[in-house]
Amino acid sequence: MNTLLPAFDFQQVFIEPWTANAASSVWIVAMGFFVATACGLVGNYLILRRMVLVGDAISHSVLAGIAVAFLLSRSRSSGAMFVGALVAGVITTLLIEAIHKRTRVKQDSAIGITFTTLFAFGVVLISLYGGKVDLDQECVLYGEISNVPVMAAPLPAALSRVAAQVPVLKDAGIFWRGADLVAPPDVLRMAGVTLLVALLIGVFYKELLASSFDPGLAFSLGINATVMHHALMAALSVVVVSAFEAVGAILVIAMLILPGATSQLLSQRLPVILGLTVLHAALSAVLGLHLGTWLNCSIAGAMVVAGGGLFGLAWMFNTRDGIICRWARRSQQRSEAVPPA
Amino acid sequence: MRPRRAIPLLAAFILLACADAAWADRIGDLSQTDWREQAKRFITLRDPAVRYALAGSVLLGMSCGLLGGFIVVRKMALFGDMLSHAVLPGVALGFLWNMSKDPVAIFVGATLAGLLGAAAVTLLRRTTRLKEDTALGIVLALFFAVGICMVTRIQSLPQGNKSGIDKFLFGQAAALGADDVRLMAIVTALAVVLVCAFYKELLLTSFDSAFAASLRLPVAALHYGLMLLLAFAVVVALQAVGVVLVSAMLITPAAAAYLLTDRLHRLLLYAMLFGVLAGVAGAFVSFLGNNLPTGPFMVLAASTVFALAFLFSPRHGVVMRWWRRRAQAQRIQRENTLKAIYHVLEVRGFAHAHSVSLHELAARRQCAPDAARDEVMVLARHGLARLQPSSGTIDLTQTGWQRACEIVRNHRLWEWYLAHQVSIAPDHVHADAENIEHLLGEEMVCQIEHSLSGAGATSDPHGRPIPSRADMQRPFGTRAAADVVDTKGRMP
């Protein structure tokens, strides 16, 4: 049992990641941050619309789409993956609806049946043919976020020349390999997806707000609820598939729910909630790196555990209905209720 | 195949297999495997590992099916999903107890973790504004992440590397040993005994918890008891199915059973049967390849069973319902043709009954003569009418005539009922009667007839006579004109 917790070495856990290993830490944290932000922003709307379990289902079942895309294209090209995952996401929603509208099986069972079937299908494909493509069961479960920096590739030369003029960038050795500016393509792609999600939420803020909180009002404003629903599902599929490589198919659920749930405990204003989501994503990425370094375990898992720790803190200490405040209020009320002697 | 023929064939097959050369002792020893060889090994059950895998699959199918039945009728499917992910840290903890795959330690750890997860969901629901699905999702993801951290940590330890703890993620029935199977048997037996003992209470709380509470049944205690049994079922299935997919073994066989029956005891039996089927089929298929994970194959087998039930369940199956609806649409079409023939006859006062031509029918049905011919051919196939090829006239058989009278009678009785008993204006009753005439049951007809004769009426609100029971018994074409002719009531 004592071997489970390695000795805590402050130098190794908190200093070294940012000195000796900075070149990998930066990219791991950046990847974790982008994954958690993109997932968290989409996840907020899932929570508000009580569709968390649909998110759960889609994040499992994109595996089938990814596996099929891998086998057909024989490569890890991201285009094929996106298409495969989108198709899998659409099939999931259609199957769930078909099962629960056409039979007397309830929606929760329909969700459970659909995603486990597709997930099992994906795992079978990977275990049968996984040796031929670079994909294994562990990657499916908890991703390979620590491999992200290894894949750093040079950026276009023009960009390098521009960056060489910027003093801060010029001195940061981690971004350079010789005269080339390098960055892992996965991180860049995830950053792009995150920006896209943020942009879409900014543009359709009003529509999303209305259709999430008051579908009736949204309808009277001429907002098409079906389109919003399917757009959200599509965004969810894109986010899940781009996060897949880093955190796997199951930890994605945590990335979807935890930031949103934490911020919704702390505030009731949507703009504040979205801001807190980003903060939660950043904190859990950094803390997760340190936790994972200390315990020498899966860093993606550690990021989720760190995010869970933040959720626990919010649960305990938030000022409106946190457990501590509740308890304090109750004891105060009790003391007030006693008539003065 | 009949069993009598199958038994000698099976026996010959087993003898043939037994005559084969030496066997590899452990499955892991084989690097190259031939699926035929593997199938032979599986069916002959000579390998102890195969026997354990088979027994394990049967036991997990039973316990998962039994508890899954309650999950499905209580709409707690996603609770089962949460529970199955949440046991992972418990498995890792049980493994850490003495750094080995001790079944009892893992059982205790996993059960505790599952119950802790259930308690966390309840607590989150009670103390925050988060909705049930969010609470379930948080607990599922967080417990799973903690479990993943522990498992990867164990694998990075020197003695943990070859531990086989990763087999818990997707399951490996071939890794089951005698101790595992013994524990599984005990837990399954316990679950079966407890469910049998408290069957009535569980039935009542599952379907009508308010009534159960009014009978002073301990609803909450039963709920937590069921949670405990559920955790047991998850843990039993863990090693063979894997953490990630246990929930499928709970939900899918039971959902298939739910499509087949309305009675809970039958649902539980069917679910157990499907669970065992899926378990054995999955174990068999995964055994054919080398070191394939068992869980996904079991889940796919269960999904196949569900898909079959979804399509072909006699009452709820999609194909069956489509078939029934099509049959009904065709029946209605036939009845409408018969009714049209009746109307043609009625307009001419039932004279020259055998000379209804296709053209008259087509005019009445407002369709082309070819379409009318097709309709009559359909009637002929069902023994309701005959088409005289030479003259092109239509002849109803006795059954056809009776059915035609029945439909017209249903229609007019209903019109009379709506006009006189429900006081709907006579010009508003036709459309409704047009639909109900095909569906009116014998009992209803008798009731309306009774009130009809009580009121002394014999015709519908439009003045046309309602065919009586005596009319139906009369041979086609010999109807006395005096009975029916009421010149006022020509067709609208």
Image (tube, coloured by chain):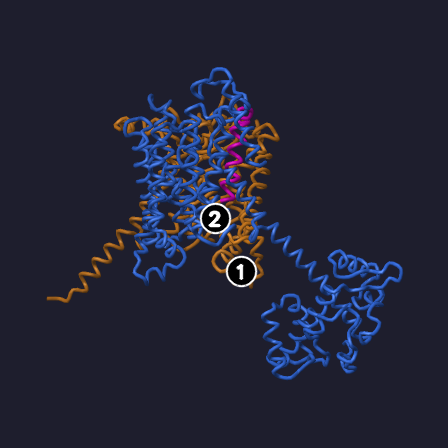
Chain colours: A orange, B blue
Q: What is the quadrant of the C terminus of chain B in the image? A: bottom right
Against A215, residue B93 (above or below) is: above
Circle 1 residue:
A218
Which residue does the image show at 70% across and 76% down from the upper left?
A: B466
Element type at mark 1: helix
Residue B226 in the image: state x and y as whole percent.
35, 48
Element type at mark 2: helix
Toward the top, the furthest residue is: B21
Residue at mark 2: chain: A
In the rendered structure, which amino acid carries the disc numbered 1?
A: Ala
Residue at mark 1: chain: A
- Between disc 2 and disc 1, the foreground one is 2
Residue bounds of the magenta highlight: A113-133
Mark closer to the chain start, 2 or 1: 2
Q: Quadrant of residue B357?
A: bottom right
Toward the right, the furthest residue is: B390
Disc assigned to residue A177 = none
In the rendered structure, which amino acid carries the disc numbered 2?
A: Ser
Visible in this render: residue A27?
Answer: no
Circle 2 residue:
A109
Toward the left, the furthest residue is: A341
Residue B366 in the image: state x and y as whole percent.
80, 66
The verdict on residue B123 being magenta is no
